Amino acid sequence: MARAVTTQRKIVATAAAWIIGLAIFFPILWTVLTSFKTEAQAIADPPVWFGFDWTLENYSVVQERSNYFRFLMNSVIIAVGSTVLGLLIAIPSAWSMAFVPGKRTKDVLMWMLSTKMLPAVGVLFPIVLIARFLDLYDTHILLIVVLMLMNLPIIIWMLYTYFKEIPVDILEAARMDGASLRSEIIYVLTPMALPGIASTMLLNIILAWNEAFWTLNLTTTKAAPLTAFIASYSSPEGLFYAKLSAASTMAIAPILIMGWFSQKQLVRGLTFGAVK
Amino acid sequence: MATQHSRAAARLMNAPAVFVLLVWMLIPLCMTIYFSFMDYRPLRGVADCCVGFENYERFVTSSSFLSSVGTTLLMVGGILAITVIGGVLLALLLDQPIWGQGIVRILVIAPFFVMPTVSALVWKNMFMNPVNGLFAYLWKFFGATPIDWLSELPLFSIIWIVSWQWLPFATLILLTAVQSLSSEQLEAAEMDGASALSRFYYIILPHLGRAITVVILIQTIFLLSIFAEIFVTTNGAFGTRTLTYLVYQRVLESQNIGLGSAGGILAVILANIVAIFLMRIVGKNLDN
Amino acid sequence: MGRITLDKVAKSFGEVNVIPPLDLTIEDGEFVVFVGPSGCGKSTLLRLIAGLEDVSGGQIRIDKVDATHTPPAKRGLAMVFQSYALYPHMSVRKNIAFPMKMANVPQAEQDKRIDYAAKVLNLSDYLDRRPGQLSGGQRQRVAIGRAIVREPAAFLFDEPLSNLDAALRVNMRLEISELHNNLKTTMIYVTHDQVEAMTMADKIVVLQAGVIEQVGSPLELYQTPRNLFVAGFIGSPKMNFFKGADAAGHDAATIGVRPEHLTVSTTEGLWKGTVGVAEHLGSDTFLYVHPETADTVEDTITVRVDGEMALRHGDTVWLTPQDGKTHRFDGAGLRIG
Ligand SMILES: Nc1ncnc2c1ncn2[C@@H]1O[C@H](COP(=O)(O)OP(=O)(O)OP(=O)(O)O)[C@@H](O)[C@H]1O
Ligand SMILES: [Mg+2]
């Protein structure tokens, strides 16, 4: 900005931004606050803000009742597993389309993205059948593979846009320097695209973590992740606000914390590599 | 850089991705097509092949089909409208010089991290509940009768919840785009005597065109398959049954696989129509 | 060793025929420069030799071995790119070490070669920096260092100096020439700067639209250009061409006289004209003369005179070609005699 901004204008903008920001954040804040209240305080009329007896009781009850940590472990395994598997398949694919483009590259990319448009319900039953047939229903492997397939087009797309920014010269230089294709990808391409790869990874962990259709329909107990954990609180007898809040907080905290710590890469990733 | 070696290598490197996606797309889809021509109701032990287009006919002619398509369009359209308009305004606001920009940005992004099941549950119980929800208190505070949001305004409520989740995404992309607008352009327009409104209309909005396209494309991909929010809140009741959800109910709840599969295929066809339309736009964007 | 032979090598991109079949031999230890106008296929030819592109036909032999289908990594050549193409995430040392790492050269040997390259190229103080922290000239040296340590059969340079400013370009030009004198390794150098070509080359290859117009030492090209294109392309300022009666007098379709081979007089001579622009470079002055009588191809005749000569805009001058310095070309543009 070449001109000095008037303080008055800055104050107005700041106030507006903070009010809207807090309003958007409020449901999360309220959930976290409620999770530390007793059930009575949680539905007190009028609502209590901070002046309540903080308690951790809800958390221990939730853990006892639903074994939170098992769901958490499942979520971590599924989210990380599907992302890593996805990257392993997507990096070579994105490399080939970004650096050895052919006549049909664009069509292939489009086709890949269009598989993402396939409504999951259309293939739900066959997938359930196949899963049962292979004896994979309610296993980590199944969810890792299915979520990987769900997100693969997006991973490839993002990596493709990031790879596109890397000058071909440098890869050719590596080739002239005697690097094999493997070394070229491991020692040159991957380190150079690391920020992009990190963004892709983070975004996909979030997408996999929050995915609810397949995780709800392909698991019962053994491999059920946090989406299922929280869905079990939607039944009427779960209507205890404090416990519901504790469970909700526990379900979203890991991703929220991860998201905040890696804000910079994430913001990049959130744009799906589509806007610079 | 395109020698036979590298082209062969490229084909090899792309093969796994193409292969798994092809399998993922084709096998279940073929099975669904097959089932859609059967009278297949496992719970009743019925599995008759082949009933021709009977399932399609029944699915299309049932009153729930058209209404579910309408619901889907309303829902996706409503969410897109709210998030795009809200996102543009919010992006313009966040682009202003303000104190604590980083923190505000964190606050605004947060809903994107919240899993749909959680956000639906939290909104449903803690905000929209007609007895204990915060909105009810607010209404009572102003002397109004609390609204039972999810049964009186169910579609709006779901649009509201999903918009809350996707607003951060739209805002962030649009903010990135706004920030890439050169201030020289705006200053030039100001020198030419353009008012703030016409500057927005003639310079900022066209500049955001590409970003808005991207927002619409990506959100549509995700919104067409909204599931958890409906599952947790209304379970498809009160006119919130989207096409996706209708098919889901036919397949899993009433276990009418044949009928559900026919619906699934219809959903796939409709989604593809939308997809072709959207792909055109992205294809254009890919070029530049 | 580094003798490179191109045998009927051709290249087309789809329908577009960029290089029709051509033959060329580059002797071991030679410094060969490819020159030609932009888009004539210099880079393409270099990349064919490097193996970064496939030939559409013909054979490439490196030291008598057919390398036509050998991948670039195995050809034993090193390339220096116009953009330097350094690995931004590696230190200078790692950049230089990379080709040796790929070849599994023992660590001790690696260190030895890095030290040598760093000394030759004045990079010793920068070994731990990243490329982003170097100036353009230093980056170019790192790129060359990376090429040296491979001990390649030949170095390939694709316009390595075009991103540098004028002064630095002169320096680097000298350094590369010196490097060649020390290493005595074959070097193939692409440029469209003919000063670089004239000063560095043992042998210049002039290309136009993928066709070799002439191959020869810088002086050969200057003194006996084989055709109009080479005559016009080599030499700066450009050769003046005359046609019509002036050429017919020499039994030619076109004659050419270099600006430095015209004698200027204010009183008498062959062609009369008025001085348009006079560019004073100090040591030399370039006069752009508008002819009254001569039948020229261009609008003006360029003349190179001594810097002391006091001529200015609007003066009337007479120009006369020096004896035996007139180049004659036939109707097809080929040199006569
Ligand atoms: N990958 C390609 N596909 C199609 N045409 C190409 C390709 N690479 C080069 N060309 C064409 O081949 C011709 C020669 O290109 P090349 O890069 O070799 O020219 P050059 O002599 O190096 O030019 P410059 O001096 O500008 O670098 C050009 O007309 C160019 O358009
Ligand atoms: Mg070139």
Image (cartoon, coloured by chain):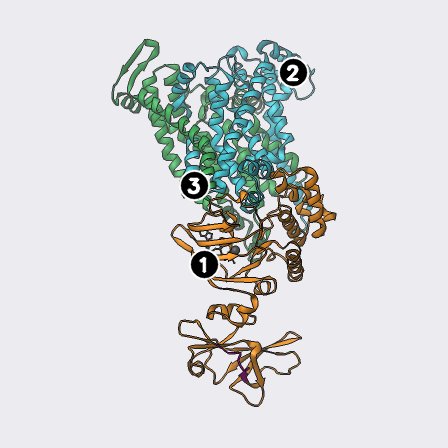
Chain colours: A cyan, B green, C orange
Q: Amino acid at mark 2?
A: Lys
Residue found at the very far front of the displayed protein: C64
Looking at marks 3 and 2 on the same chain, the residue that comes earlier in the sequence is marked by 2
Q: Kindly tell me whether residue B244 is visible in this rendering.
A: yes
- Circle number at residue C210: 1
Q: Work out how far the residue at label 2 is from the one at label 1, CA to CA, in angstroms.
A: 81 Å
Magenta stretch encompasses residue A224? no
Three-letter code, disc 1: Gly
Residue plotted at (48% across, 19% down): A142
Q: Position of residue C329 (x, y in %)?
A: 44, 75
The percent coordinates of residue A134 (x first, y second) are: 43, 15
Q: Report how far apart the C-alphas of labels 1 and 3 lie in the structure.
A: 31 Å
At label 3, which amino acid type do we have?
Lys
| Residues at marks 3 and 2, CA–CA distance in whole angstroms | 55 Å
Residue A106, numbered circle: 3
Neighbour tally class for label 3: few under 14, some 14-19, many 20 plus, Cα within 10 Å: some
**Residue displayed at 37% across by 21% down:** B247
* Residue under disc 2 on the same chain as residue under disc 1: no
Label placed on residue A37: 2
Depth check, front residue: B126 or A144 = A144
Q: Is residue A196 left or right of residue C121?
A: left
Residue sitting nearer the eye, C222 or A72? C222
Whether label 1 lies within 8 Å of ligand 1 gets the answer yes
Mark 2 within 8 Å of ligand 1, using the beta carbon: no
Task: Chain letter for mark 2, please.
Answer: A
Q: Which element is circle 3 on?
A: helix
Relative height, residue C209 to residue A18 (above, below): below
Report in which chain the residue with disc 1 lies: C
The foreground one among A146 and A25 is: A146
Q: Residues within 10 Å of mark 2 (few under 14, many from 20)?
A: many
Q: Which residues are magenta?
A: C319-327
